[in-house]
Amino acid sequence: MHLTKLLCSWQRKKPFTDGEEVIKPVLEIAAKMLGDKKIETKFKEIPLSNNTITRRIEELGANVIEQVVFQAKNCAFFSLAMDESNDICDSAQVSIFIRAVSKSFIIEELLSLETIQGTTKGTDLFTTLKACVEKYNLDWTKLDSICTDGAAALTGKHLGCLSLLAKFLERPLLTYHCIIHQEALCGKTLNMKHVMDVVLKCVNPKTCSIRCQMLPNAAHGETYDASPETTICWRSSARIRPQ
């Protein structure tokens, strides 16, 4: 009965603010398994309202950002990676990742996710990037390189984001084309039918069950399935899972 209640709460597919519907059933199950009335009373006193859970998640997120910014400020050099795409509401979102290096640590984290209102030209992307770096008071002199997906708005010779960034820094900057995007472009050009035929046989559950045995969990000896659908990977062929 308790397990059914727990499964039903998870199957609601609601956001993390529904602590009363997700976390409280777990605490009730734990309290009954322990068989201690005092513990059960303490569990019931834990505040799990939507506002409380939201505030705690925001505090955790702020702490993560604080740690990333602290390490980025104390690094020897850092590089950035940025990509622009539209969300399900057709709003332009720019994701900015940072890789900071020093003698004692290397971090690779999401620095910020910025929303662009209006156009997504090179000037707009540069303004967004500049505002993000300055918002966290990062030292521009430590910026060593930047990686993008090769879009014209990012790599344009005169008004691209990278060109405007180089002019702003008044020094050359190492720029890279994302290797995953390059692989996707190659996959559209090369004739890989002899490879894709084998992949289809391994991935399609109607023809082979080997996909259920892939990616074992070394720590627990468990197996799990990885979703093959992605728009920027070798397995993104339209025929990867024929209907």
Image (spheres, rainbow, N blue to C red):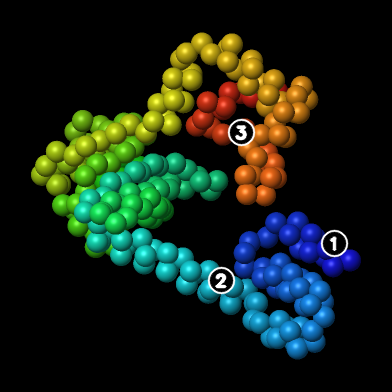
Q: Which residue is mark 2?
A: 54
Q: Which residue is mark 1?
A: 4
Q: Is residue 200 above or below residue 102?
A: above
Q: Position of residue 63 (x, y in %)?
A: 42, 69
Q: Earlier in the sequence, mark 2 or mark 3?
A: 2
Between 152 and 190, the one nearer to me in the picture: 190
In which quadrant of the rendered image does the C terminus lie?
top right
Tag 2: residue type? Thr
Tag 1: residue type? Thr
Q: Position of residue 25 (x, y in %)?
A: 76, 71
Residue pictured at 64% horizontal, 44% vertical: 217
| 139 displayed left or right of 117 | left
Distance, label 2 to label 3, CA atoms, is: 31 Å
**Callout in the foreground (1, 2):** 1
User: Could you classify mark 1 by the number of other residues whose Cα lies within 10 Å: few (under 14), some (14-19), or many (20 or more)?
Assistant: few
Tag 3: residue type? Glu
Q: Secondary structure at mark 2?
A: helix
Q: Is residue 202 visible?
A: yes
| 136 displayed left or right of 97 | left
Between 104 and 234, the one nearer to me in the picture: 104
Q: Secondary structure at mark 3?
A: loop
Q: Earlier in the sequence, mark 1 or mark 2?
A: 1
Instruction: Examine the image and state in which quarter residue 23 appears.
Output: bottom right
Residue pictured at 44% horizontal, 20% vertical: 186
Q: Which mark is residue 229?
A: 3
In which quadrant of the rendered image does the N terminus lie?
bottom right
Distance, label 1 to label 3, CA atoms, is: 31 Å
Residue pictured at 37% horizontal, 65% vertical: 67
